[in-house]
Amino acid sequence: MSDDIWQRDEIESPCVKVCVIHEGAGICIGCNRTRREIAGWSRMSSQERGELIKSLPERSQLLRGVRKGRRARQSAPKL
């Protein structure tokens, strides 16, 4: 039996399952997408996804020096 039936020709999500939105930058510290981009991913065309993927590396500059992961969540101010 072939797995070809499960193959898709779409751009995969950049999600790395570290879903924490940095409030100052407004982007996820795992994948560098905004809330709106994360929510709209399934409705984006291949072209839109490709453009978004290309823009993500430069967004990581917004998070330079930001603490990430469990330690960051523990030290974040409580609302």
Image (tube, rainbow, N blue to C red):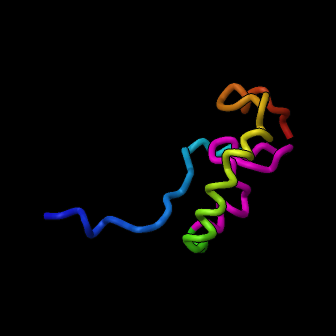
Where is residue 29 shown, x and y percent of the image? 69, 41
User: What residue span does the magenta drawing correspond to?
Assistant: 21-41
Magenta span contains residue 46: no
Q: Residue at x 65, y 31 (%)?
A: 69
Q: Residue at x 27, y 70 (%)?
A: 5
Q: Quadrant of the C terminus?
A: top right
Where is residue 28 shown, x and y percent of the image? 70, 47
Would residue 15 be found to the left or right of residue 34 on screen? left
Where is residue 67 shown, x and y percent of the image? 74, 28
**Above or below, 10 relative to 59:** below
Where is residue 65 shown, x and y percent of the image? 79, 28
**Above or below, 6 relative to 14:** below
Q: Residue at x 86, y 43 (%)?
A: 24
Magenta span contains residue 25: yes
Camera-side residue of 41 and 21: 41
Q: Residue at x 59, y 63 (%)?
A: 50
